[in-house]
Image (cartoon, rainbow, N blue to C red):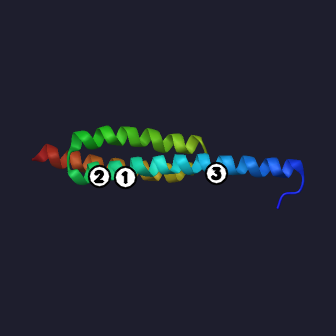
Amino acid sequence: MANTSSAKKAVRKLERRTRINRMRRSTMRTQLRKAEEAIAAGDATTAKAVLTATESVVMRSVQKGVIHKNTASRTVSRLTKRVKALADVAAQA
């Protein structure tokens, strides 16, 4: 348990940052789930629109320090590849 006033303040700040980061991570995961659902639905135009929003949310999470830059880049890259494959299949049909 924190004894000094500065340590108590540090604990309060840590709890606040934890709540904020948890909210941001939850928002990001929700957006990723929407992207997954759009890809699974098979609609290329909807998937592209959702991908744009998802990329924005994921990269904002990087700026806020919720996840690492390489993790975000890998996630966005994989989603983009899947959306592109979906668009290619739609174009061939």
Which label was assigned to residue 58?
none
What's the residue type where badge 2 is placed? Answer: Glu
Cα separation between marks 1 and 3? 22 Å
Residue at image coords 51%, 53%: 71
Q: Say which residue label 1 marks.
A: 33
* Residue lying at 32% horizontally and 53% vertically, measured from the top left: 36
Q: Is residue 18 left or right of residue 48?
A: right
Residue 10 at what x, y percent from top left?
79, 49
The answer to whether one can see residue 66 in this image is: no
As shown in the figure, which amino acid type bears the numbered disc 1? Arg
Residue 65 x/y as whole percent: 61, 46
Element type at mark 2? helix
Residue 17 visible from this viewpoint = yes
Q: Position of residue 19 (x, y in %)?
A: 61, 49
Residue 57 image offset from top left, x and y in percent: 46, 41
Give yes or no for contact between labels 1 and 2 (Cβ–Cβ under 8 Å).
yes
Element carrying mark 1: helix
Q: CA distance from mark 1 to mark 2?
A: 6 Å
Q: CA distance from mark 2 to mark 3?
A: 28 Å
Circle 3 — which element?
helix
Q: Earlier in the sequence, mark 2 or mark 3?
A: 3
Q: Nearer the viewer, mark 1 or mark 3?
A: 3
**In the image as oriented, which residue stretches furthest toward the bottom?**
1
Q: Which residue is mark 2?
A: 37
Name the residue that disc number 3 marks.
18
12 lies left or right of 56: right
